[in-house]
Every structure is written in C-alpha cells, then in structure tokens.
Amino acid sequence: GAGVSQSPSNKVTEKGKDVELRCDPISGHTALYWYRQSLGQGLEFLIYFQGNSAPDKSGLPSDRFSAERTGGSVSTLTIQRTQQEDSAVYLCASSPQTGTADTQYFGPGTRLTVL
Amino acid sequence: DQQVKQNSPSLSVQEGRISILNCDYTNSMFDYFLWYKKYPAEGPTFLISISSIKDKNEDGRFTVFLNKSAKHLSLHIVPSQPGDSAVYFCAAYSTSGTYKYIFGTGTRLKVLA
C-alpha cells in the first residue's frame, strides 16, 4: 500500500492495562508524528520523530506514554496503565522531510476505548 | 492556551452556495498554514496550504485567504457540493520553529442537497 497504515483500527481495553499502537509510515518518509483526537477536540500533538534525531516528546501527556521508531520506519506508541481519559482516536502521520512545512499524510487512526 | 482556533464547530450550507470556514491564530511566528479535510473513520487529508508571503491561494473550488494583521485565515469552497461534507481542520506551522503542526478543533461542514 502507498499510504500510512495503522493497527489495530479499534482497541478496547480495561483500565490499568497496557496497549501498543502501531504505525507504518509511507516508505521513504523521514518524519513521523503521533496525534490524539479526543471527542470534540482538535488534533493534539504527542510526539515527533525525524530521522535519527532525538524525538520531540513535548506533547506526551504523562510518563505512561512512550513511543519508539525502529530503523527509521515503523513506530509504536505505548500507553501503560491506561486510564479512561486515554480514550481517543490516535492518528499517525508521516512527511518526506521537515523544515519546509511538507504536507503530512495521515493514517486512518486507531480508536482506543478504555473501559 | 489554544493557539489555533476554529470558533464555529459546525456550518450548514446549501449545495451550490459558498462555504466559508474561519480560523484564527495567536502566534505571530506561524508562517505556514494548511487546511485538512476529514471524513468519519478516516485520517485527515491535505486540502490546500498558504505561506505567509501570500494572502491568497486558489486550487479549483478551494481558496484560502490569509490576513496576517488580523491573524486570520479562511477557506472558501465555491460551489459547495454534498461530497464536501466533512470536518475541516486548519493547522499552523512555524518554519523556524520546532516543526510542530498546531491544529484547530475543526468545523463540521454539512452541504445540503
């Protein structure tokens, strides 16, 4: 596929459990972003990866959230000890490079529901 | 602090008429602005952008206007079509900043046939 893919598309979990969300960016895109969209809210920036540089984690809401990007490609967002307020759609986007305000290409998102 | 604001959560327009979606920003460091369109259960898709060196950018039925002094941009869709019904997000970016896109809360547009 040519686009950004995310898995799973839906995840229902119980409060206190850990979850992992996966993002496969467009091949060759060096920049990768994670966002969260809670009900009735805009897209909230979480974390940004660019090549081999240290990620910008300034948007992560708590230390229960972490993300990795292996080999400059696939990224995993991990939420530990999930809380009900973590329920949201988690969106991943990639872009070719930074510094030139490139268009971001978004995946379809993962809808997370914490019971 | 909401740096990018879309004050109208929803808008209804008759087919064939003009749709105007508004966006305000507070940070004068933003110098690049984008509009995204989002259908249910899909990720946002890029629609149109504008650099701060311009005050207008047009692409088919879509035109974005930028008023830097007012820190305001708007998206015009003419003529509106039922397929344009979606949520529209504006986003702002600083090319000299930390490469973070700041998104508004979105406006849900409904085009009535």
Image (cartoon, coloured by chain):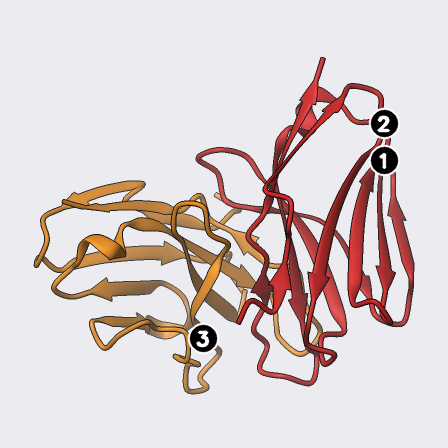
Mark 2: secondary structure: loop
On residue B79, which mark appears?
Answer: 2
The x and y percentages for residue B11 are 67, 33
Left or right of A109: which side holds B33? right
* Front label number (2 vs 1): 2
Residue beneath the point at 91% across and 66% down: B54
**Chain letter corresponding to the colour red:** B
Q: Is residue A12 above or below residue A85?
A: above
- The residue that label 3 is drawn on is A49
The three-letter amino acid code for the residue at tag 2 is Pro
The x and y percentages for residue B109 are 65, 33
Q: CA distance from mark 2 to mark 1?
A: 7 Å
- Which image quarter: residue A92? bottom left
The three-letter amino acid code for the residue at tag 3 is Phe
Q: Nearer the viewer, residue B6 or A14?
A: B6
**Chain letter corresponding to the colour orange:** A
